[in-house]
Structures are given as structure tokens and as C-alpha cells.
Amino acid sequence: MDAPPIQVTNLKKYYQVHDKEPGITGSLKSFINRKYRDVKAVDDISFAIAAGEIVGFLGPNGAGKTTTLKMLSGLLYPTGGEARVLGYLPQERRPAYLRQMTLVMGQKQQLTWDLPAIETFLVNQAIYEIPEDQYKKTLNELTELLDLAPLLQKQVRKLSLGERMKCELAAALLHRPQVLFLDEPTIGLDVTMQTKIRQFIAEYNRRHSATVILTSHYMADVTALCKRVIVIDHGKLMYDGSLEELSARIAPHKLVRVEFASALNGHSLSDYGEVLKHKGLRAEWLVPRSKTSEMAARILAELPVADVTIEDPPIEDVIARVFEQAALARAERGDSEDEDEE
């Protein structure tokens, strides 16, 4: 059986941070007796990702997501443990490895500001030693998928944020990497452009069976692309599994939304579950999963229902519950709340 393309075992990244008291006195003291504290940006996490998977990598600001991706892409050397990607140790930064992976960071750019995007593409062709026929074929494919034709000859500084992000993705994928580390690829984009970027990532994955790790604070990115999520908080692995299982474990309820055909006559909505909203002819309940079918049947039989929908709570609420539980657990242990490096 082939090894998974991404294998992380007890990975750690610790930093020493200088603690300085404020003011001139603090500065003078730091010259004589400088004090440091350890920050555990990534603290002993392990996971494996199979070929062709798109996995959501979630956590609050400072959880260690970007630090992990930088170690997997070879930008940072781990303090402990091991990461192997496509059989390589990323920190060795071997050319054979770099030609098979890419890191896209939504808040960073590789395009040259004053030149058209096509110029950066040509530079990347030379860097990755992409044969001319493969370069043209890939560029045509990316141009079609991302609708780049009107953008390639425009100066990067004249592109909108969404247009620039499309060109950034194309530049990062010209060498057809098999592993993609995508760090907030839709940050700051409007809803329409977010949808286009998600569609592109899904299509690239389908065409090339690429393995993808995606971080995003937009849960729509995760729900649209990822069946599996890895959740970390303060450098610790909190969850690794399917979105459905996470929702069932953390939020063991369903949302039942009803639109009534007429006004209610003496019925108490609280008899059918925890009432979240009730305004006019609309109501919303929170019902235990095990009783959803029973309660829905009662509502349909006893109330003047015009329409009813049953769904899981928003994934944003589920993830927020995970972090709340983690914060409570840290408080009970007396752990420091100092924010780790992202």
C-alpha cells in the first residue's frame, strides 16, 4: 500500500519570545537580564492525508495553521517530530520536491507589481524548467478555468483584488503541483469571486487528483470543498474527521424551521422543542437529533404548516463550540491564554 502523500507525526514548532517590561526602565532591564518565554505554535500534532483529498485545516487566529503549512512547504524547520510530503522532508527543500508542491497565501503575492501577470508566469516557467509545450497547454487550461484572457497583459497593480487572486493561483499552478497548501485563498474577495475560486480549486483537484490542505475563515469554502476537517487550537489537534461527525458530536441538535399557513390558535411552541425564533408566521426550533422525526411529525399533524425545513446548525456555530470547549478545558487546567504564533 502506497504511503499517503502527506504524513505528519508528532510535529512541533516552538519559539522563544522576548518578554520586555514597558518603558525605558523595562528596556534597561532587558539589556541586563533578558527574559524569554516559550510559545508552542504547533504542539505535537499528527495526521495523514490521502492522495486527492481536500482537507479543511481550521482554527482561530493564532492556532498554528499557517505555521504548520510553512513547515509542510519547507519554509520553517520543525522543532520536533517529522513531516513527510510526497516522501520528502520539506525542510530539505529539494528541487524535486519543490516542483511538486505549491503554497498560496491569500495575504501574500508573488506577482511583480508593475509588470503584467504574464511576465511572472514566464519567470515561473524558467524557475520550474517547464517545457514550452507543457507551459502553453497548462496556461491555456488555467486561462480557460479562471477566465484570465483579459487579465494577462494588464499591470498587476491595475487588477482588482479578485483578478489578482486568480492570477496568483495561476502562477502557483503552472508547474502542475500534486500538493497544494492554500492559506486563506479567498480572503477579502466578494461572494461571487469566492464562489469562482472554490469552483476552480474543485475542478483542479478533479482534473489532476491533487492533494489539498485549505485554511479559511469562510466556512462556505470548507463546506463546499472539504468532506474532512482538521481542527487545531493553540497548536493542539482538537479534531480530525468528517464535517458531519463533528456537527453530530458538538451540536447534537437539528434546526427545524416552519412557515405557518395561518395564525396559531392556542398552541404552545415550546411543546415541540427549544424555540429559537418566533415572529409572525415563522418559527424556528432546536430539536435533539434523536427526536427530530417525532417532533417534525407532531408539528405537521398539530400545527397549520405551509412549509418546513430541517437542517444541521451552521458549521460556523459548530466550530465556535469546539473553540469554546477548548478554552474551557485550558482554563480548568490553568493553561496560559497567551496567543500563539499563527
Image (cartoon, rainbow, N blue to C red):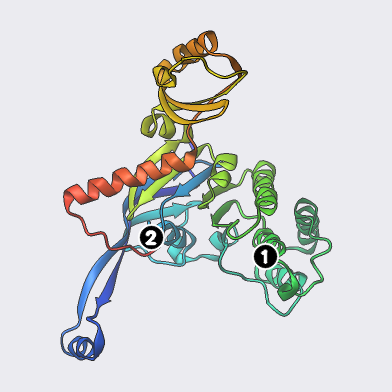
- The crowd level at tag 2 (other Cα within 10 Å; few <14, some 14-19, many 20+) is some
Residue that appears at 56% across and 52% down: 179
Report the front residue among 194 and 284. 284
Residue 89 locus on image (x, y percent) = 44, 59
| Residue for badge 1 | 161
Q: Secondary structure at mark 2?
A: loop
Report the front residue among 225 and 337. 337
Q: Secondary structure at mark 1?
A: helix
- Name above or below for residue 290 compared with residue 158: above
Residue 39 locus on image (x, y percent) = 28, 65
Mark 2 or mark 1, which is nearer the start of the sequence?
2
Q: CA distance from mark 1 to mark 2?
A: 25 Å
Residue that appears at 50% across and 28% down: 284
Residue that appears at 58% across and 25% down: 281
- The amino acid on which the numbered mark 2 sits, given as a three-letter code, is Gly
| Residue for badge 2 | 62
Residue 3 seen anywhere in this rendered image of the structure? no
- The amino acid on which the numbered mark 1 sits, given as a three-letter code, is Leu
Report the front residue among 54 and 138. 54
- Name above or below for residue 106 compared with residue 22: above
Residue 210 seen anywhere in this rendered image of the structure? yes
